[in-house]
Amino acid sequence: MPDPTESIYWQSFKAGHADAFEYLYRNYASALYNYGSKFSQDKDLIKECIQDLFVGIWTRRASLGNPEHLKNYLFKSFRHLIFKKAFQLQNFETYDEANDNYAFQISLNVEEAMIDGEHRINVSAQLNLAMAKLTARQREAVFLRFYEQLSYEEIAEVMDISVKASYKIMARALGFMKENLSKDDLMLLSLLLHLKLLS
Amino acid sequence: MKKPISAYTSYHLEELINDEDFLLWVLHPDEMSNLHWQNIQDTFPPLRETITQAKTIVQSMRFERDNLNDNEQSELWVAIQARTTLLKKSGKRMPLWYRYAAAAMLAGILLSVGVFYQMTQPISINTPYGQLKTITLPDGSLVTLNANSTIKYDRNWSKNEIREVWIEGEAFLKVQHLNTSKKIANHERFVVHTGEVNVEVLGTSFNVNDRRGRTEVALLEGKISLGLKGTPGKPLVLAPGDIVEFEKGKLIKKPINVAEYASWKDGKLYFKDVPVAKIFNYFEDIYGYKVVVDDPEILKKRVSGSLNTQNEQVLFKAFGMTLNLDITPNKQTRELMITSK
């Protein structure tokens, strides 16, 4: 595990210490909630999945290994729970992940800092329009890459796809956005999408 | 750094933003990159402005974040604790509790009676007109209480007793599933009491509406059974998607879109081919108005659509526009005047 403190907490959690369990919860609850909210508007559903996730790891703590990246492990399990639950509730009409038949809504904000009012609104609108045209899977990859700053390997792990597929999904997303945005918009976008694209 | 400084001479804003090293520096600056970029700016002063601009732009892009506030985070943690063994572990702190108990006795019987009274007094929560509230029950089950509604339950839920709540008005419940084996123990049972109906639950989410002398129960997930108060007859078992109405001593199953039915808990109101009269009933129940109609024909119209219920002003306006009506709330008399345009 890259973060040594986290590794200590993880071991302590596995040994059954409630404090360490609470630390893990406090550390990840809001990031999980943010991620989960992109899949569904149903806030209760997301909270319930967070509950299930933590209750689950607590009950199974003795048999859990030492995931190399705890965050990926939690995100992946959490994602799985959301799909399972959303399918039961039939929020997603058919549960067919392979065909992108799920929801993942993100919106981008261009902060007021530098760009003036009207232009900012235009660029935001353009960006969000282009985002909306991507598939859910592409949006999810973009989110994990540029918001959660996961590597392609990590995205592949969380989304349960091959590393090659994660590169492909991202390349398609970027290609599509290039075609759909003006040069000005593209400039703004590229900075967003380029954050760590080549690393 | 991969590039020689001279490579940046002719850089424009766009190229800069596309530059991996540049982004790394802006997002994760360290001593070395600070020095590197300072060096570039000193060597090519005209670049200084471009760099400042590009930097600001990069820093101004943000994904919108869905926030879990501190309160919600803590509520969720309580629910998690309730479902894990964490609460039982607090038994280790018994000696401390004894000390408090001893102190309470010293402080006088009066005080301890007061504490006892508070501990055993059932919790009663009600919502005013126009406001929703989400409550976490002692077992971690979640209740969303609609406006103008009341829930009552015991403060402490003992391990061996049936979980019970009493509801007036309307509520959406997500019940924690405790049953692990085939045999159902007492504490795994969850019963909702309303005016005339008892709802018996096993890990599920459903909507209860107990207003205007009738009870409606809609099931979204899981399994529940309904029994009439005081009649030991065979309980009616509901499957997901079922809605049951109790009126005048009878339980009737009706087809309805259950997901739409409980949409109020997300601050929305969905309806499909519903008589206007029913929507007005809803306005009365939720916002506390008495609806006054100038032409009773309005009530017979049927509407479909979706409305945002968070703002009552906007809601009335939107609904009025859809039906070509003037809807004017009178704050003094609490009347909602409906007139055709």
Image (cartoon, rainbow, N blue to C red):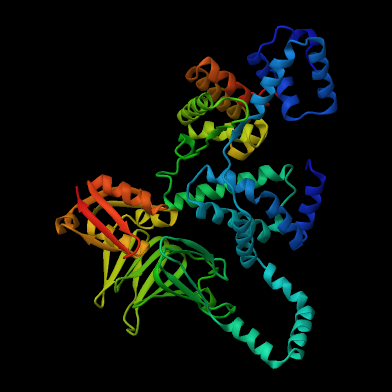
Residue B144 position in % (x across, y down): 47, 62
Residue depicted at x 58% and y 41%: B65
Q: Where is residue B35 in the image (x, y as percent from the top left)?
A: 84, 21
Q: Nearer the viewer, residue A72 or A129?
A: A129
Residue B88 visible within the image: yes
Vertical order, A187 against B62 (above or below)? above
Pinpoint residue A56: horizontal percent, then vertical percent.
63, 57
Vertical arrangement, residue A74 with respect to residue B221, above or below: above
The picture places residue A130, in percent across and down from the top left corner, at 48, 26
- Do we see residue A56 in this rendering? no
* Outermost front residue: B332
Q: Quadrant of the N terminus of chain B?
A: top right
Residue at x 76% of width, y 52% of height: A10
Between B264 and A57, which is closer to the camera in this rendering?
Answer: B264
Residue A73, by quadrant, is: top right
At horizontal 52% and vertical 28% (from top left) the residue drawn is A124
At x 82% / y 28%, what residue is drawn?
A: B30
Q: In which quarter of the image is residue B85?
A: bottom right
Q: In this view, does A118 lie to the left or right of B54?
A: left
Is B197 on the left-hand or right-hand side of B104? left
